[in-house]
């Protein structure tokens, strides 16, 4: 049996867990890089074929807000 490591990381549950982790740390730090990571994870879940329609729709709707947070932080010079 050939197990591929990337197969496990692309499961919607793994992406959602990572997303929760990133969002929690963003609240603590306000780091725009974390906001960008949140945005990218939202984008991945928004188009993930195995994610539920509710998760896809929610992530699609929130992706833009996180992208704007990342851009606003970068514009303020918070990115190094």
Image (tube, rainbow, N blue to C red):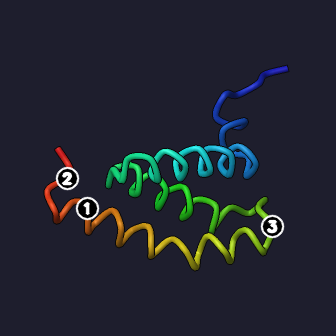
- Where in the figure is residue 19, as x and y percent of width and height? 59, 51
Which one is closest to the eye, mark 2 or mark 3?
2
Q: Observer-nearest residue: 37 or 9?
A: 37
Q: Which circle marks residue 73 in the picture?
A: 1
- SS at mark 1 in the image: helix
The answer to whether 79 is drawn above or below residue 74 in the figure is above
What residue is shown with label 3?
Answer: 52
Quarter of the image where one finds residue 45: bottom right
Q: Residue 18: x and y, percent?
A: 61, 44
Quadrant of the snapshot with the C terminus: top left
Q: Residue at x 38, y 47 (%)?
A: 29
| Marks 3, 1: nearer the viewer | 1
Question: Which of 9/59 is in front?
Answer: 59
Going by the picture, which residue comes out furthest to the front? Answer: 28
The percent position of residue 72, horizontal first and vertical second, equals 26, 68
Which quadrant is the N terminus positioned in? top right
Q: Secondary structure at mark 3?
A: loop
Mark closer to the chain start, 2 or 3: 3
Q: Earlier in the sequence, mark 1 or mark 2?
A: 1
- Dot 2: within a 10 Å radius of its alpha carbon, few (fewer than 14), some, or many (20 or more) residues? some
Horizontal arrangement in the rendering, residue 37 relative to residue 6 (left or right): left
Q: Does the CB distance between marks 1 and 2 fall below 8 Å?
A: yes
Q: Whole-Å distance between the Cαs marked 2 and 3? A: 35 Å
Gap between marks 1 and 2, in whole Å? Answer: 6 Å
Q: Residue at x 55, y 48 (%)?
A: 24
Helix, strand, or loop for circle 2?
loop
């Amino acid at each position: 049996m050939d197990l591929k490591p990337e197969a496990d990381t692309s499961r919607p549950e793994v992406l959602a867990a990572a997303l929760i982790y990133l969002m929690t740390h963003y609240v603590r730090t306000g780091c725009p890089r974390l906001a960008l990571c949140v945005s990218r994870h939202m984008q991945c879940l928004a188009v993930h074929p195995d994610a539920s329609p509710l998760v896809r729709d929610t992530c699609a709707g929130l992706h833009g807000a996180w992208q704007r947070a990342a851009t606003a932080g970068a514009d303020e010079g918070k990115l190094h």
